Amino acid sequence: MADSLHKVIENQRLDIKKLQKQTTEIGQQKIQLAQQKAQLEQQKAQLQGHEIKIGDIQPQIQNQNNEIASIRKQITILQEEISKLKSAALWFCK
């Protein structure tokens, strides 16, 4: 009887050790998860900052594109005027 009680107690002691080890591991995993969550929150904040910057830059890019289009149009007009002047100069030279 004492022998079987001793085995039961020993088994329970081993079970308690296993549970303590598992509890420690779970605690470590919780810490790691909390750290990962903090990193993700930080990355999320950084991404939101980048989104704001991109939103600020997009209108500037659009303005620059509009300016480029306007300059190209002016260049085309100037090229046409130069062509007309060349034609007129050639006509006067004849």
Image (tube, rainbow, N blue to C red):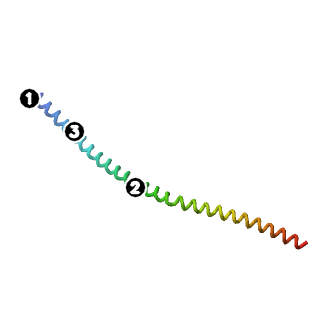
Coordinates of residue 28 in the picture (x, y in percent): 28, 47
Residue wearing tag 1: 2
Of the pair 91 and 14, the residue shown nearer to us: 91
Q: Secondary structure at mark 2?
A: helix
x and y percent of residue 50 in the render? 46, 57
Q: Position of residue 7 (x, y in %)?
A: 14, 31
Location of residue 56 in the rendering, given as x and y in whole percent from the top left corner: 49, 60
Q: Residue 89 versus residue 24: which sits nearer the camera?
A: 89
Which disc number belongs to residue 30?
Answer: none
Q: Amino acid at mark 2?
A: Ala
3D distance between C-alphas at marks 1 and 2? 64 Å
Compare marks 1 and 3 and give the one earlier in the sequence: 1
Residue 54's place in the image compared with 90, above or below, is above
Q: Which quadrant would residue 25 be assigned to in this image?
A: top left
Q: Is residue 54 left or right of residue 42?
A: right
Dot label at residue 45: 2
Q: Residue at x 22, y 39 (%)?
A: 19
Q: What separation in Å lies between label 1 and label 3 (alpha carbons)?
A: 25 Å
